[in-house]
Image (cartoon, rainbow, N blue to C red):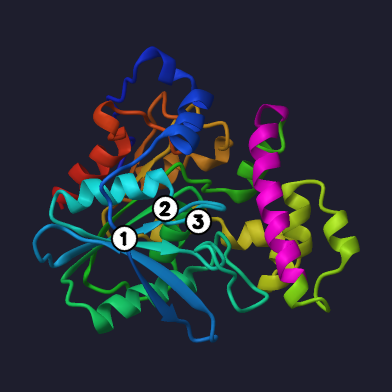
Amino acid sequence: MPLVASNYNPPILFKNGHLSTIYSGIFRKIDGVVQERERITLSDTDFLDLDWSFATQKSDKVIILIHGLEGSAQRPYITGSAKVFNQNGYDACAINLRSCSGVPNYLFRSYHSGATEDLEAVIDHLLKNKSYTEIFIKGFSLGGNLTLKYLGEERIIPKEIKGAVAVSVPCDLHSSLKQLLRPKNALYAARFKKHLVEKLQSKQKLFPDKISDQDINSIKTLKDFDDIYTSRAHGFTDAIDYYTQSSCRQFLPSINIPTLIINSKNDSFLGPECYPYAEAKNNEKLFLETPNFGGHVGFYGVKNTTYTEKRCLNFLNEL
């Protein structure tokens, strides 16, 4: 489909991309979401923690929510989405990617932007152990890339998966990385790197033969982290190989269920290659909306409901 027109027009303060990003990530609070944790065991003996919240009445619809880099199922953009969908008759299954649920995962490997095998494991779990007839997916940032890659890879998509939405997606990971390394994003990059290195230091204690002090001390940028840990731990040659294989943009032409991408034009994390205009134009199932405002996973809205939460609900309800 061609580009979808956007009517998102926030208050003047939230037309600033950085303010929108920071408010959503740090200051927004969500009340009234009660989550129940379920742990599932993966085929490689590791685990994922799923945080569930439910509609007021028994539902046959569920939305899978996937957080971004160093996020969790407790981030406001996840709990805010869960609340909106719970209030509208959907159960919500919020995935904590490996190492993101508050406890370390068992293996040296962790999560990354292309690890669709873990999303596939969650979907298989729902199909085998739950009674949902309609499954939807909503991913944010890294989780959005994961969602789109899963949908476009060479696999049979279960008939129960009816639609998906991906918000603030780094469709080209190298393009996004180059933006994060620019001075305008120095504070964000430093924050991500700090959390990632702290986790790696914890892993070093469990796997001292696989990561050295010298390795950790040599991490100066996010790319260094991907060269030293992400690529090694997950079977890639180096960071560039990881970005090349894991970027979802190459998989978009093969998506064959209704899917909406919402990437704001003032998202400082996204480079030009992260806006897949041509792919959307040539795929009738792929909808691309690029509002002028919203920042990165921002999209401030009144009554503490973001624009993308409303937009996602409306899009999926219309399928």
Residue identified by numbered label 2: 74
- From the viewer's perspective, is the residue at label 2 or at label 3 nearer? 2
State how far apart marks 1 and 3 are (Cα): 30 Å
On screen, residue 245 above or below 29: below
CB within 8 Å, label 1 to label 2: yes
Is 160 magenta? The answer is: no
Q: Residue type at mark 1?
A: Gln
Q: Secondary structure at mark 1?
A: loop
Residue at position x 30%, y 43% in the image: 31
Looking at the image, do the residues carrying marks 1 and 3 touch, with CB atoms under 8 Å apart?
no
The amino acid type of the residue labelled 2 equals: Gln
Q: How many marks?
A: 3
Question: Can residue 25 be seen at all in this image of the molecule?
Answer: yes
| Kind of residue at disc 3 | Cys
The percent position of residue 34, horizontal first and vertical second, equals: 28, 56
**Mark 3, residue position:** 248
Part of the protein shown in magenta: 183-204
Label 1 or label 3, whichever lies nearer to me, is 1
**Residue 189 drawn in magenta:** yes
C-alpha span from label 1 to label 2: 9 Å
Q: Which mark is residue 35?
A: 1
Question: What secondary structure predominates along the stretch shown in magenta?
Answer: helix
The reply to whether residue 4 is in sight is: no
Q: CA distance from mark 2 to mark 3?
A: 25 Å
Above or below: residue 12 compared with residue 208 = above
Residue at point 44% right, 38% down? 297
Q: Quadrant of the N terminus?
A: top left
